[in-house]
Amino acid sequence: MPSSLRLFVDAARARTYPRVAWLFRSRTWIFQETLLPVLGVAAFAYSYRAMQAPEAYTGLVVLGAAMTTFWMNVLWGMGAALYWERDAGNLELYVMSPAPLMGILTGMALGGMTTTLVRAATITVAGVLLFNVPLQPTSWWALAGVFLLTLTALYGLGMMFASVFLRWGREAWHLVNLFQEPVYLLTGTNFPVSAIFPKAVAVVASAIPLTAGMDAMRQVLFHTPGIFPVWQEALLLAVLSVVFLLLARRLLRNLERRAKEEGKLTIRWQ
Amino acid sequence: MPVMDHPPAIRTDQLTRTYRLPRKRWGKSPPADGPAAFTALDGVTLEVRPGELFGLLGPNGAGKTTLIKILTTLLAPSSGTARVDGLDVVREADAIRPRINMVSGGESSGYGVLNVRENLWLFARIYGVSTRTAYDRIGAMLDVVGLADKATARVSHLSTGQRQKMNFCRGFITDPKILFLDEPTLGLDVTSARAIRGFVREWMAERPERTLLLTTHYMAEADELCDRLAIIDRGKVLACDTPANLKKRVQKHTIFELSLAPGRNGWADLGKLPGVHQSTANETPTTVEVKVLLEEEPVIGSVVQKLVTSGGHILSLKKVEPTLEDVFIELVGHGLGGDKPADRPSGGGP
C-alpha cells in the first residue's frame, strides 16, 4: 500500500488531469473567456486615457482583469467543485477511495490554476500589447513570489468554499452572488485601493487575498502606493494561505463526518 | 469457494440505519402525522466468508444499497456494528478503503472530456495503482467487456450501456480484496451480461481470498453466481442460505418430470414405491407425462428401475426445481417487480 503522501500526490495529479485535458480539448474557451475580458479592459483603459491618467493605470486594469479570472475560478470553479462532483457521481468514489480528499481537492485547485493561468496570461499579453502597458518591475522574483502566494491563498480559500458550497448548496451560491460586487469593489479590480479608500477600509479589505495580492503586485510592477509594504503583504498572504488550507482540511473532515451521519451530502442516491 | 478458517470478510451485527425525515424547511412543514424517521436497515446480522460470492436479494427500498453504503464506509450506522475484512467501518474506515471497491449498475461517474482509458486510469491512480499496472489491467478489462475499440473514445460519446461497462471495469482495476457490485448487469444486453457473469466467476476463482457481495434484481443471475444469498425486505434479513437450501425451504419434496412412450408400463404403480410421496400422470396420444414427488432425491433411482423393469420407455427425465423467485415470493409476499406495500417509501434511500 503506498504511503499517505504518495497517495496524496497521485490523487492530486490524477484529479488535475481532467481540467488540463479540458484546456486542450474544449478550445472555444479562448474566445469566450479572453475576448470578453479584454473588451472590459478596453473600456476602462480608454476611460483612463480620456482622463489623461498615468499610463500605469492602464496596467492596473490589465492586471485586475487577469487576476479577476482567478477569483472567478475560485468562486465558481473551486467553490462548486465538490457539488458538481457529487452530481456526476464521482464524489462518493473519491470518498470511498484510500486517497485523501485534500489530495483530490488539491488536484482540482491545481487544475483550476493551470487553466486559469493560461486564460490570465492571454488577457495580460493581449492587454499589454494592445495598450502599450509599461512594465518596469522592481524585481521579477518578487513579482513571481507574490503571485504564487496570492494563488495559494486564493485557492486555499476556494478549497474552503468547496466544503461550504456542498454543505449549504444554493444558499451558498446566493451568498456569493450577494457579495460578488462588493468584493470587486474592495479588491480594487480597476483602481489602486489605497488611493481611493480610507486606510481603515483598505486594511480590512486586504484580508481578501485578491486585494493584498493585487496591491503587492501593482507595487512591484507599476510602483503605485500600497496599503502595506510588499514584504508585509507577502507575509499576510502566507499567513492567509496557511489559515485557509488548515480550515479547508478541517471543514472537509467535518463534511465527511456529517455526510456519513446524514447520508445525503456526498452520495448521489439512485 | 469460501475460505472457512479465516475471520469473516464481512460481518454485521444488529446493524440499523435510520434516516431523519426533514421536519421543516423554508416555512413548509411535512404532514403532522407523518413519520419523523425512516428505518432503512433494521437489526441486520450477516456474515460473509472470505472467498464467498454472496448475494443480496430484495425489492426497491429493501435496504440493500444502504447496507452497501455502510460497508463501503460512505454511511455511518445508527446502531449495531459492521466489520469489513475484520475492520470496523466507523473507526477503521481508512484501513478498509484500500481493500475494497464498489460498482453500481446505474452510476454515470467519470469525466466526459476524458476518454475511457484516461477515466479508468484516474480512478486507478487514486488507489495508488501505478500507471503501467493500471494500463495493463485497463486493457485486459476492456477486452472482457468488449469495449477495447472504445478505449480512446471520449466518455461523453459513449452510450449508457458502454458507460456502464466502463464503470464495471473501474471496480476491478484496483484489484480489491472485497468487491461490492450493486446491480452490475442492470440494463446490459444479454451477451454483455453473460460475459460479465463469466468474468466474475473467473475473477473469483483466480484468488480464493477474494470476496464479492452482489445485489441483483435478476433471480437467475443470483442463482447462477452466488454461493449464498440473503433475502432482505424492509431493512430486515428474512433468510440467508445457499440458493439450493433456500429453494428447499419452499419445497419439502423433490420433483421429477418424466416423459414416457405411450402404454401402461409400470407408471400407474409408482405411487406405491417407498419414498415416493405422490405420482401423477397425464396421458396424451404421443407421450405420458409423469410427475413424481419424492421424499428424497435418490429415490428417483427406484422409480427409473421400476419403469425399466416394467417395460416402460423413458423419453426424458428432468428434475424440476423451485426457483428463487418462488422463495422470494414465499418470504416477501410479492415478486421483485411486484407491487410495493403501501406503507413505505420507494427508492433506495432518502
Image (spheres, coloured by chain):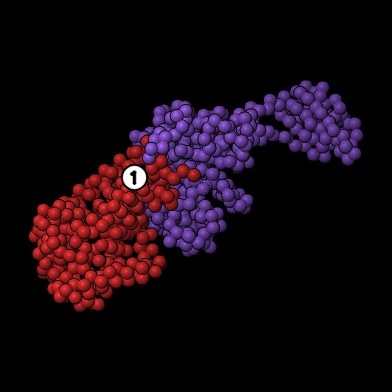
Foreground residue among A204 and A147: A204
Percent x, y of residue B310: 87, 30
Chain in purple (letter) = B
User: For chain A, what colour was chosen?
Assistant: red
Residue B125 is at least partly visible in this image: yes
Label 1 sits on residue: A168
How many numbered marks have been drawn onto this rendered protein structure?
1
Q: Is residue A109 left or right of residue B63?
A: left
Left or right position of B204 against A13: right
Q: Is residue A100 positioned above or below A219 on the image?
A: above
Secondary structure found at label 1:
helix
Amino acid beneath label 1:
Trp
**Picture coordinates of residue B169, whole percent (x, y):** 49, 52
Quadrant location, the N terminus of chain B:
top right
Please tell me in which quadrant of the rendered image residue B89 appears. Answer: top left
Label 1 marks which chain's residue? A
